């Protein structure tokens, strides 16, 4: 059997499907969609038009946490939705309950968990892990192997460099008290986070902040300041020519 397409799936015009792919019940696929080899599209997933889905990707997967996990599965997760013109890389895994806007780019081997809201024109690079209940604003770019922890908010036009790590828990799993304080970072519009930086739980990175590579951000930043070091401290103001208001 080359492919399996459930009788209830709805495919638009000029949809191309590679070998050994599975499209489950209730899936809706728009026009001019290209689906690679060995792709699995789980039940109910909604895919817009002009979407490219690379080999071995899994779309609309239900979460299956470990028995010891603190994350519980919501039985009422809505179907995964992918907007028009998006590209899904090889071996990417996108979970049920998340929504992706138009012209989103998901790199190879990236994963996005359930209950995430992804805006338009977002780039999520190769090997990036986005955990559950994350919000990412339009035109934001997250580069290779960054880790975006659960309950993080990232506004529009943010840049996150490779191997950045965000955190949401100061208690390291030793006490039930930690559940009251779990909170990811809030990264505001136009902020830039340099490579290998670490953001501690619950901090706010203000608009146009620039976090230099390798910094440890352990407190809220000020707007349009450059931060360096361990822990991060103010070095200087962000030059006016580098602010969003002065970009083409």
Image (cartoon, rainbow, N blue to C red):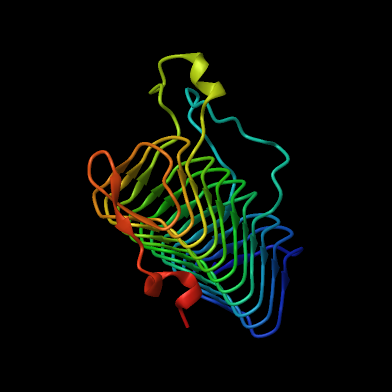
Considering only vertical position in the picture, is 220 above or below 70? below
Furthest residue to the right?
8
Furthest residue to the bottom?
14
Q: Nearer the viewer, residue 155 or 5?
A: 155
Horizontal side of residue 139 vs 170, given as left or right: right
* Residue at 71% over, 78% down: 12
* Residue at 49% over, 39% down: 184
Query: Is residue 54 among the parts visible in the rendering?
Result: no
Residue 222, image x, y percentages: 43, 49
Residue 136, image x, y percentages: 54, 56
* Residue at 54% over, 40% down: 151
Q: Nearer the viewer, residue 6 or 105?
A: 105
Q: Count up the numbered dots.
A: 0
User: Where on the picture, by quarter, is residue 200?
Assistant: top left
Residue 167, image x, y percentages: 40, 37
Considering only vertical position in the picture, is 109 above or below 153? below
Residue 79, image x, y percentages: 69, 53
User: Where on the picture, by quarter, is residue 165?
Assistant: top left
Horizontal side of residue 109 vs 22, given as left or right: left
Q: Nearer the viewer, residue 178 or 189?
A: 189
In the picture, the quarter occupied by the N terminus is: bottom right
Query: Is residue 107 among the parts visible in the rendering?
Result: yes
């Amino acid at each position: 059997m080359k492919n399996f397409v459930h009788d209830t799936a709805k495919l638009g015009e000029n949809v191309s499907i590679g070998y050994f792919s599975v499209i489950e019940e209730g899936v809706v696929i728009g026009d001019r969609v290209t689906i690679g080899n060995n792709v699995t599209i789980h039940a109910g997933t909604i895919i817009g038009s002009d979407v490219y889905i690379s080999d071995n990707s899994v779309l609309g997967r239900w979460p299956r946490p470990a028995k010891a996990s603190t994350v519980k599965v919501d039985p009422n997760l809505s179907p995964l939705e992918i907007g028009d013109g998006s590209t899904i890389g090889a071996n990417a895994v996108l979970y049920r309950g998340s929504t992706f806007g138009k012209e989103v780019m998901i790199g190879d081997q990236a994963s996005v968990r359930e209950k995430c809201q992804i805006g338009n024109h977002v780039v999520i690079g190769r090997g990036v892990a986005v955990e559950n209940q994350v919000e990412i604003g339009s035109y934001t770019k997250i580069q290779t192997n960054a880790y975006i922890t659960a309950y993080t908010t990232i506004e529009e036009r943010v840049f996150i460099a490779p191997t950045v790590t965000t955190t949401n828990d100061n208690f390291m799993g030793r006490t039930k008290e930690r559940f009251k304080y779990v909170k990811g970072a809030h990264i505001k519009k136009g902020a830039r986070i340099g490579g290998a930086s670490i953001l501690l739980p619950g901090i706010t990175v203000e608009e146009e902040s620039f976090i230099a590579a390798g910094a440890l951000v352990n407190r809220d930043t000020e707007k349009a300041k450059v931060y360096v070091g361990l822990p991060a401290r103010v070095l200087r103001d962000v030059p006016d020519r580098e602010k969003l208001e002065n970009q083409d």
